[in-house]
Amino acid sequence: MAQSASFVDTIIVIGGASTHYLGINHTAFIIGALLGDFIWLFGLNFISRKYADKLNQPRVWFVIDIATILLVAYVVIKMISFFFA
């Protein structure tokens, strides 16, 4: 089952970013973005099914959580340094 939030995010992000392109470039951008979104969501579904037994282990989720925390912290630091530079 697809998440409705992914469709809203896709429409808003693609719609907003595609306004910079005109004509065939606009169409190519939309097709490429939708194809990338489809591949990403299909890939997540495939990987989660393939590695479901490993993903049920608490140690794996601990590593995923730590990696997520580090990634978000990095993005926050970069955003703060951008605004105060």
Image (spheres, grey):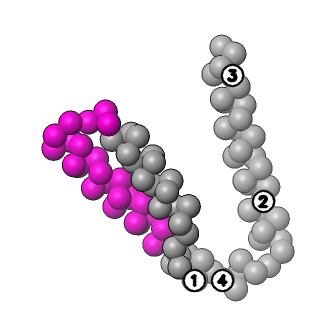
Q: Is 39 colored magenta in this rendering?
A: yes
> What residue type is disc 4 on?
Ala
Q: Earlier in the sequence, mark 2 or mark 1?
A: 1
Tell whether label 2 touches label 3 (CB within 8 Å).
no
The numbered disc on residue 52 is 4
CA distance separating discs 3 and 2: 24 Å
Locate residue 47: give its quadrant: bottom right
Q: Is residue 63 above or below residue 82?
A: below
CA distance separating discs 4 and 2: 17 Å
> What residue type is disc 3 on?
Ser
Tell whether label 4 touches label 1 (CB within 8 Å).
yes
Residue identifier under label 3: 81
The numbered disc on residue 50 is 1
Density class for disc 4 (Cα within 10 Å; few <14, some 14-19, many ≥20) is few
The numbered disc on residue 65 is 2
Kind of element beneath mark 3: helix
> What residue type is disc 1 on?
Lys
CA distance separating discs 4 and 3: 38 Å
Q: Is residue 31 above or below residue 2?
A: above
Kind of element beneath mark 1: helix
Q: Is residue 41 above or below residue 48?
A: above
Q: Looking at the image, which residue is at 31% across and 33% down?
A: 20
